[in-house]
């Protein structure tokens, strides 16, 4: 969807809280001019760095930092932030930062928080253009995960800064 809407090819893209870089590396492969991968986890960022090298991607820049410290202006933000299910408000820094630095955002959230996220964006001058609901499989990765795999209801939201179309 992001490619067909003109939000990736030859654009400056940031993946905030990138983890191992799946979204950002995908944008780099699809023709982004430059992709910024931002994460606090040095191990995950190193996995992303190795993947970029293996894929021969030279349009990726790595930022080991809290997303609140990232100050680059970009055309598009892609992100799958923490859902805030384990720690209430964990997604808030991601919500705030993306609305400061981009003109278009793609963001995934726990579906029950959809109305909060949409209202948050609208109150800051953003227009939601697309919402896709789907089940997102999450493998057991953390101690608090109880099952081997769980399906979580997720909403993917695309929004554009008012006046940017």
Image (cartoon, rainbow, N blue to C red):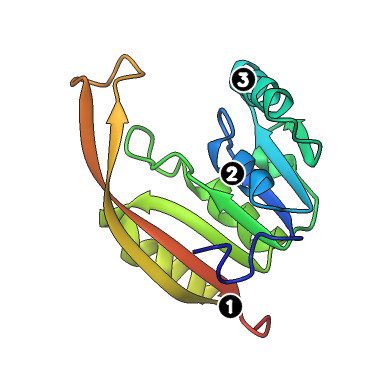
Vertically, is 67 above or below 73?
A: above
Residue beneath disc 2: 26
Residue 52 on image: x %, y %:
70, 29
Residue beneath disc 1: 125
Q: Specify the quadrant of the image occupied by residue 66.
A: top right
Q: Residue at x 51, y 75 (%)?
A: 123
Residue beneath disc 3: 47
**Among the two numbered marks 2 and 1 on one chain, the one whose residue lies closer to the N terminus:** 2
- CB atoms of marks 2 and 3 within 8 Å: no
Q: How many marks?
A: 3
Q: CA distance from mark 2 to mark 3?
A: 14 Å
Residue 1 on image: x %, y %:
49, 64
Q: CA distance from mark 2 to mark 1?
A: 28 Å
Q: Specify the quadrant of the image occupied by residue 83.
A: top left
**Among the two numbered marks 2 and 3 on one chain, the one whose residue lies closer to the N terminus:** 2
- CB atoms of marks 2 and 1 within 8 Å: no
Q: Work out whether residue 42 or residue 144 is closer to the camera in this orientation and state it.
A: 42
Q: Work out whether residue 25 or residue 46 is closer to the camera in this orientation and state it.
A: 25
- The reply, left or right, for residue 3 in relation to residue 83 is right
Q: Nearer the viewer, mark 2 or mark 1?
A: 2
Q: Residue at x 62, y 20 (%)?
A: 47
Q: Does dot 3 land on a helix, a strand or a loop?
A: helix
Q: Nearer the viewer, mark 2 or mark 3?
A: 2
- The reply, left or right, for residue 40 in relation to residue 126 is right
């Amino acid at each position: 969807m992001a490619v067909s809407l003109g939000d990736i090819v030859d654009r400056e893209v940031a993946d905030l809280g990138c983890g191992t870089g799946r979204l950002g590396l995908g944008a780099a492969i699809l023709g982004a001019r430059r992709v910024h991968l931002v994460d606090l986890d040095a191990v995950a960022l190193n996995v992303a760095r190795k993947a970029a090298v293996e894929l021969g991607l030279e349009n990726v820049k790595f930022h080991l930092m809290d997303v609140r410290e990232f100050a680059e202006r970009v055309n598009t933000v892609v992100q799958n932030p923490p859902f805030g299910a384990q720690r209430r408000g964990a997604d808030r820094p991601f919500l705030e930062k993306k609305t400061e630095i981009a003109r278009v955002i793609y963001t995934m959230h726990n579906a029950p928080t959809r109305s909060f996220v949409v209202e948050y964006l609208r109150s800051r001058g953003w227009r939601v253009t697309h919402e896709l609901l789907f089940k997102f499989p999450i493998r057991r990765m953390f101690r608090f995960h109880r099952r081997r795999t769980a399906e979580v209801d997720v909403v993917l939201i695309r929004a554009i800064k008012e006046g940017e179309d």
